[in-house]
Image (cartoon, rainbow, N blue to C red):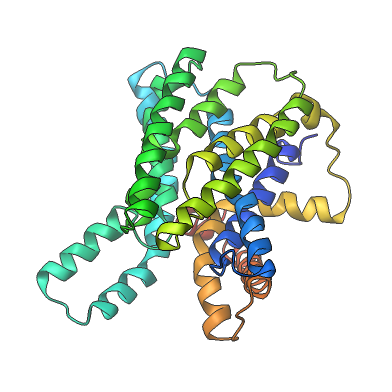
Amino acid sequence: MTTASGRLAYYDFLRGIAILMVVAIHAYIPGGFDTLAGEAALFFRQLLSCAVPVFLAISGFFLAGKPLDTWPERRTFWRRHIVGVYVPCLVWSVPSLFLGLAAAGTCTLPVVLKWLLIFFACGCGVSYFVALIIQCYFLLPWLKRGKTASLLGFGLMSCVAVLAVSWYLYVEGQDLPDLLAAGPFPVYGFFFVLGVWLSHRPRTYRFVPLCLLLLPALWWMYVETQWFMSFHGKGVGIKLSAFLYAALVILILFSRRLQDVYAGRGFIFRVVQWVGSVSFGVYLVHIHAISLVVNLFGLDGWLAKWMGATLLTLAFIAAVKRVMPRFSAKWLGFR
């Protein structure tokens, strides 16, 4: 099923679900295994770990067919796609830039230069994803063949990177900005490559066995999280079990059989598809919306923050797109 604009409705639906999961991740209130409610919230948070990998896989899946054999084709692709995500990222990073400068308490030249470097490197807030996807766009001409050997090699690369990052963060108890923890291509780049690889295959495999494999993956994620949190109380994010879980989810969701049976009928499905069509804008705006619903409206529960920030973000995007469609598409990322 395709939309009126020629987009595949199924993948807009997946984008919609994934971006709602991203908002939930960033609205999450850290908890632990001390209470049943905290344990349930922690388990649900782990289920959301596939959100960003799904986005990367969808991007690789649809970009793999781009003609990028010549340098003029590559330059045109890079100029259009990299500028298209980088400029809106900078626009929506301006509040974080000024908040960072204000929090520093001084505007000396080293402090200003530091925050400008963070700003232009897409290091403000959760903008690491833009830095990551720019790397994927740049490397696409050399990734688009979708060979299985390359997929396995990139999988090994990401496993090593994930192990190193999770050990440094959780066992050593150190801190890393998102730009350095999740932004480098070796950490999450495998999922973009997985999307490219899937685009070259019929995807008619049986997905029921993959669903069964999710159970041990979830159990491993639970055990690994508990073990990591025993050191310094951290362990919800990047880790090898979440990497495996996300890969299985992507293989299941990209099954041709699921795509073919998706009808997309009904109000809820159409709403989620629309959310998926503006998912990049939601990603850019939602972190500011979370701050607003907490500080302005006093929402403090996870569900309340999630729903409040989601509704505020979607209402804002819908209004701006209606009033300034071209400006919002070019400068704000509301495509």
Q: Residue visible at 65% across and 50% down? A: 47
- 153 w.r.t. 60: above or below: above
Relative side of 274 to 178, left or right: right
Residue 265 position within the rendered picture, expressed as x and y whole percent measured from the top left: 88, 46
Residue 127: name its quadrant: bottom left
Relative side of 195 to 251, left or right: left
The mark total stands at 0
- 136 w.r.t. 47: above or below: above
Residue 37: name its quadrant: bottom right
Residue 219 position within the rendered picture, expressed as x and y whole percent measured from the top left: 64, 43
- 223 w.r.t. 39: above or below: above
Relative side of 131 to 197, left or right: left
**Nearer-the-camera pick, 210 or 99:** 210
**Nearer-the-camera pick, 22 or 135:** 22
Q: Residue visible at 31% across and 69% down? A: 97
Q: Residue visible at 58% across and 30% down? A: 62
Relative side of 269 to 333, left or right: right
Residue extending farthest left:
109
Q: Residue visible at 39% across and 50% down? A: 86
Residue 70 position within the rendered picture, expressed as x and y whole percent measured from the top left: 37, 17
Res. 79 visible in picture: no
Pick the quarter of the image with the N terminus. Answer: top right
Res. 25 visible in picture: yes
Residue 40 position within the rendered picture, expressed as x and y whole percent measured from the top left: 68, 62
